[in-house]
Amino acid sequence: MFSVKGQSNGNADASLLPLGLILQIVAIVHFIRRRPDTYWLYIILFLGPVGALVYIFAEVIPDAGLLNQSFKGISRRKRIAALELMIRDNPSVGNLEELGELYMEDGKLQQARAAFGRAIDARATTLDCFYRRGVCAILLGDAPAALPDLEKVVAKEPDYDFNRAPALLAQAYALTGQKEKAEALFRRVTVTSTLSETYLNFADLLASEGRNAEAREWAQKVLDKEPTMPRYLRRRERPWSRRAKKTLKRLTA
């Protein structure tokens, strides 16, 4: 009787091993892709399936929204294909603007920039069209081309897109060597804006001038926001937090 019981327990334990391994693989793959706090990797590895399960509940399940984004991506690409066909016959401003926005959402900045350019050439008058073309240009590393679009937007609406427009204009000034104008605009924007992107771009400007202590202060501000953020926002801010840590490490070294 005893040997039979022991054998059945052994088989039960063995049957659990594949599931536990699957949980760990899922957790590790998610960790590599999303790069949460490093301590989670130790929990997954050293606590085994239990640690993986804790990680899945804490990090993977809240990311379920990413699946919804994937489905949106599929429908977005279908809409892009439809608009590309429509524009052959009807290159209207509205169609071109919508195509540009969808390209941006899909990460196709070069195509988005071209679509907004065509819309502007077709007499688009909305500030958003100029703004988005400027954003595409600066993200593509073409700050000189971004300047006139962003200047046009900020001249008409100084705090456009919750102050991101003037912040990106300041960045464009910095990248084109107009550092005094860049610093003045950064300081105006950061009075009300708390965007991590803005803080880090300002830190980069200060560091380029050898003002490392000030640069560290602005990079540290990004990390100082984390404790008071809700979890979903901390997840969204992770790329900026990683960049802030790299900046601090570089400036300290």
Image (cartoon, rainbow, N blue to C red):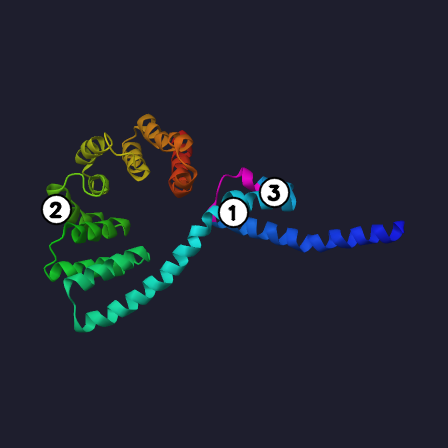
Query: Mark 2 — residue?
Result: 152
Closer to us: mark 2 or mark 3? Answer: 3
* Label 1: few (<14), some (14–19) or many (≥20) C-alpha neighbours in 10 Å: many
Magenta stretch: give its range: 34-41
Q: The C terminus appears in which quarter of the rendering?
A: top left
Q: Is residue 253 visible?
A: no
The amino acid on which the numbered mark 2 sits, given as a three-letter code, is Lys
Q: CB atoms at circles 3 and 1 under 8 Å apart?
A: no
Disc sitting over residue 31 in the figure: 1
In the rendered image, residue 38 lying in the magenta stretch gets the answer: yes
The amino acid on which the numbered mark 1 sits, given as a three-letter code, is Phe
Query: Mark 3 — residue?
Result: 51
* Label 2: few (<14), some (14–19) or many (≥20) C-alpha neighbours in 10 Å: some
- Secondary structure beneath label 1: helix
- Secondary structure beneath label 3: helix
Query: Residue 39, image x and y in percent?
Result: 55, 37
Query: Residue 158, image x and y in percent?
Result: 15, 39
Q: Nearer the viewer, residue 79 or 248?
A: 79
Q: CB atoms at circles 2 and 1 under 8 Å apart?
A: no
Q: Is residue 70 visible?
A: yes
- Secondary structure beneath label 2: helix
Q: CB atoms at circles 2 and 3 under 8 Å apart?
A: no
Q: Quadrant of residue 89?
A: bottom left
